Amino acid sequence: MLAGALIGGLLGNSIAGRGDRTGATVAGVVAGGALGVALTAKMDCGDRSYAYKAYSDGFNGGRAGATYRWENPQTRHRGEMRVVDYYNDEDRFRCAVFTQTVYINNRPEEARGRACQQPDGTWAIID
């Protein structure tokens, strides 16, 4: 979880650009922590850096049905995520339902979740 939170914080901070990075970093830590536990528990730190880029690209890509893949050439661990659909929640946040599969030692682990875009542009995994 801590590694996920750290990477999430770094992603949130870098996505924020020159604006208010504090909110983006906090949102990234929350999202990264949740993602770290729920989706990447068996991945090493190197795997996570590849995975987080794929998730960021997928959520920001705006293309439901597109698959975003990642692979760590050192470990040969790989995975993919796909946004099933985008929607606006009751608070008018842009949200996404997504699926993901992570292959560790060629064993697939699948999960489904939801993420919502925060006012500062970062995405938070909500379940």
Image (tube, grey):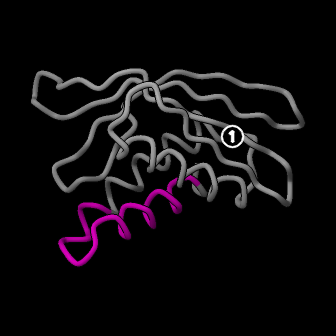
Question: Which residues fall within the magenta stretch?
Answer: 4-24
Residue depicted at x 52% and y 41%: 35
Left or right, 94 with reference to 64: left
Q: Which amino acid does label 1 sit on?
A: Ala
**What residue is rendered at 56% in x and 52% in y?**
4
Residue extending furthest toward the left:
91
Mark 1 is surrounded, within 10 Å at the Cα level, by few (under 14), some (14 to 19) or many (20 or more) other residues, namely few
In the depicted structure, whether residue 109 falls above or below residue 60:
above
At which x and y percent is residue 27? Answer: 32, 53
The quadrant in which residue 94 appears is top left
Q: Residue at x 28, y 67 (%)?
A: 16
Q: Is residue 56 left or right of residue 108?
A: left
Check if residue 21 falls in the magenta segment.
yes
Q: Main secondary structure of the magenta part?
A: helix
Which is nearer the eye, 65 or 54? 65
Residue that appears at 55% across and 40% down: 68
| Residue at far bottom of view | 18
Secondary structure beneath disc 1?
loop
Would you name the residue on which mark 1 appears? Answer: 41
